[in-house]
Amino acid sequence: MRWNFKSSRITLFLEKEESLAPVQAEPILSVAPSGVAKLPGRVIAALLAFAFVATIPFLGLSEFSTRGEAREAIVAQQMQVSGDWILPLAYNELLPSKPPLFHWLVAICSAPFGEVNEFAARLPSALCAIFVLALFLFCLRTTFDSKQATLFATVLLLSFEWARASVSARVDMVHASFLACGLLVSFIALERPRLGLWLFATVLFALAALGKGPVAIALPAAILSIWAIRTSDERCKQLLRIAACLGGALLLTLLWYGEAYVKAPQAFVERFWSENVARFAGTMSDTPHDHSALYLLTMFFLGLLPWSGYLLWLQRKNWRSTWRECRSNWPLTPPIVRFSVYAVTIVFLFYCIPSSKRGVYLLAAYPFAALIFTALLQSKISELAVRRCLCIGVLALMLFQGVIGPVFVAPRGSERPLAEVLSKERHGTQRIYSFGFEFYGAAFYSKSLFLRLEDAFAPQRRVPRAGDLIVC
């Protein structure tokens, strides 16, 4: 066989040039043309079914083993007992520290059972977590394909903090769910202005504010305003729309705040100031959860495990080149991914301001963090691997909630045995006082409002009588 040296050399040169040519990356969350949906409805239904199986069936198997769950359940319990749905009393006969949306939902979910129990108390958090997934998948159905949607759902459902909060009887998931959904709907309304979208966002922000307070108005104001100023050509119009949306949400929220103020003016104002203004300014007398910004960043990283660790491991050697590539491609990045970066960054910086810091405060940023992870990981993991991760993760959650939690974790912290002893020892109108520790679980299971002995001799408090029980 005779070889033509020149032609073979040219051929080799061309092959070398082709091998050196940059491989075209998979498009990051590209929008389907003409608004045609890329995500089949059956994929959305399957992912929501996975979310349902991972959260709902085992909610009632574990007794309350943390102080926070029982504390919130007591408020809903007192709603049912007293019939007061505006300002029910909490532990130590004090006003609740948070607005009543979560407690309303728990009381409604408890109606079929006739009383508040573990399943009903945790159900609102689980339903809100599923609602977030459903709304994000539906709103981004022209952006996601099947692989991207599955990866997004897997990252969100299996992130440690999100998975933990979605099966907890706490106000955080309810607040964060409506806040994250409000931000997503507002982003879409800024891109495609429609009155219906703005009205929907107004309701979502009002519900978020009724879940945890005015932070659900202030935080979206910062995120949406900065986004509009940085990206929009019609800044004034966009800012006016944002102001109208959040102003409407504030007015809806004031319906409850006004009723609460009329019911107990002084006590409500003191509670509102302590939980919102003093906590944010760091002037509270006890300053709970006093931590640094580094602590909050660490908790965010741990809350996003295993995905934060996986991404860090992937970029362990070339993180500088990845950072330069992200910076150079920033103008070409889809708007929803850029908005997610803004949302996550501003939520984190916002909660760096108060001295009180907890990882769960960042919960509203998790759906947007999942979007960022989806954009970063979609070219590094196959669709089959994503599906396997989702199945294995859901099975692990079911194992923990169905076996490990009820058998090994909850019994260690449950105060039901103490409640049973107190129910036997208590007679007639005996009051129960706690000393040195708040026994929220025992108060819930004994269906009694414990009083704190430390506060018993304060003005307008009940002084202990002979025969009253003291738990310490």
Image: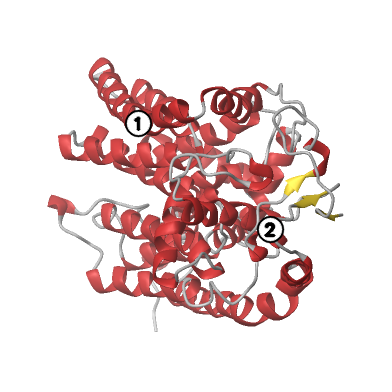
User: Residue at point 25% right, 51% down?
Assistant: 31
Whether residue 17 is visible here, answered yes or no, is no
Task: Give the vertical position of 396 relative to 370 (above or below).
Answer: below
- Lateral position of residue 395 relative to residue 92, left or right: left
Q: Nearer the viewer, residue 446 or 184?
A: 446
Q: Residue furthest left?
A: 34
Mark number displayed over residue 255: 1
Q: Amino acid at mark 2?
A: Ala
Counting from the top left corner in percent of width and height, residue 436 is at: 86, 47
Could you give the CA–CA distance between mark 1 and mark 2, rounded to whole angstroms?
31 Å
Q: Is residue 321 left or right of residue 27?
A: right
Badge 1 or badge 2: first in the primary sequence: 1
x and y, in percent, of residue 167 in the image: 54, 64
Pick the front one: 464 or 74:
464
Q: Which residue: 64% across, 58% down? A: 70
Q: Position of residue 296 (x, y in %)?
A: 68, 40
Q: Quadrant of the C terminus?
A: bottom right
Q: Name the foreground residue: 126 vs 47.
A: 126
Which amino acid type corresponds to the residue marked 1 in the rendered image? Leu
Give the labeled residue for mark 2: 443
Please state if 159 lies on the left or on the right of 423 as rendered: left
The percent position of residue 374, horizontal first and vertical second, equals 45, 56
Q: Is residue 328 above or below residue 400?
A: above
Kindly indicate the quadrant of the structure image that contains residue 414.
bottom right
Say which of marks 1 and 2 sits in front.
2
